[in-house]
Amino acid sequence: MAGRNVLVTGGAGFVGTHLVDALLERGDRVRVFDNLDSQVHGPDQQRPRWLSEEAELMIGDMRDADAVARAVRGMDIIYHLAAAVGVGQSMYRIAPYTATNTLGTAHLLQVLVDREIELERLVVASSMSIYGEGRYIRSDGGAPMVLQRSADQLRRREWELRDADGVVLQPRHTDEAKPLDPTSIYALTKADQERMTLQIGDAYGIPSVALRFFNIYGPRQALSNPYTGVAAIFSARLLNGNAPLIFEDGEQSRDFVSVHDIVQALLLSVDREEVVGQALNVGSGRSITVREVGETLARVLGVEIEPEVTGRYRVGDIRHCYADISRARDLLGYEPRVSLENGMTELVAWLQEQERPEDGIQHHAAELAARGLTV
């Protein structure tokens, strides 16, 4: 197939630059639309060194409808990755997160509708955060009645979900049919992005798909950004000789997926007709505790620093959520290829080639505490 014109919003970021490389490798012509946010890219807002020179860079903001209109001109495929990211920060930067994520997506869709732009595919980056807590069952096989942990329970440091009768609930793989229950402004806006894209896509015949990414890690993460992924945050702490700070007791579980597997899913999503109108989980399909992630990184880095368990809780955090990826396997032909150990080894090798990152997590923790967002 001849190369296509592809727009990647947020394409100068972590996932975006990896996707751009893959698109160029398969012969596509790529335009990147990105605001080069200083929190992610640093104060100088220069073109990231890992963004290929073969890609056209259009600097602009999703909140600027005219800039978005210029960016989509002449495109065959759009990957909409642009978003303000960070659960904790979203709880006190409410307007900026909503404007960037929800209104920004509305601007994109408005342009597509008003100009009757015919796309081969529109792919939106959704998030596991929209589920809130993942799937749970009772040990007796019954359906749980409780969906979230109460404030009183968290103050008692009873971290696991308990049903109304006090029975501790057992986590299970989270499938796409699980009802959505966003617990942060960030999660709400990601649900907005997904639902708006699929609804408008269905109404106007724009072939659209939403990919619900779980916890992504890998080279090119913004190490000095305290609102980025936990693997990058822990790495920055360890490289500065500091213990990773772990909330609750460290036994909360997540699904960590390599950026290379994310790119695999993104590429597959534009050529499979079966996925149009669908929302699909993209993860590793495996559960690992946050404490184990910190220990794995320390081991791979070769440092003897134990994670510091704070016993505190962040408003908006959940206990367990890991992916059921059977739908992505069936409809996309997706299969995770990078093990956690190999992925972390790759991340560490990249880290050791970088300048020592600024460790901003203490400032972040203090900001949350000052606003009453930690318990």
Image (cartoon, grey):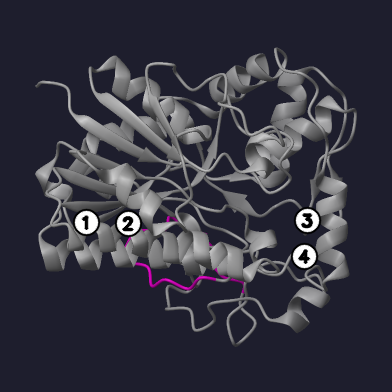
Q: What span is colored magenta in the figure?
A: 168-182
Q: Which residue is mark 3?
A: 247
Q: Nearer the viewer, residue 264 or 296?
A: 264
Q: Which mark is residue 179?
A: none
- Given contact means CB atoms under 8 Å apart, are the residues at marks 2 and 1 in contact? yes
Q: Position of residue 256 (x, y in %)?
A: 53, 40
Near mark 2 (Cα within 10 A), the count class, few <14, some 14-19 or many ≥20, is many
Distance (Cα) linking label 2 and label 1: 6 Å
Three-letter amino acid code of the residue under disc 4: Tyr
Three-letter amino acid code of the residue under disc 1: Leu
Near mark 4 (Cα within 10 A), the count class, few <14, some 14-19 or many ≥20, is many
Q: Nearer the viewer, mark 4 or mark 2?
A: 2
Q: Regarding mark 4 in the picture, which secondary structure is present there?
A: loop
Q: Which residue is mark 2?
A: 108
Q: Nearer the viewer, mark 1 or mark 3?
A: 1
- Given contact means CB atoms under 8 Å apart, are the residues at marks 4 and 3 in contact? yes
Q: Position of residue 72 (x, y in %)?
A: 28, 45
Q: Which residue is mark 4?
A: 313
> Is residue 23 shown to the viewer in this render?
yes
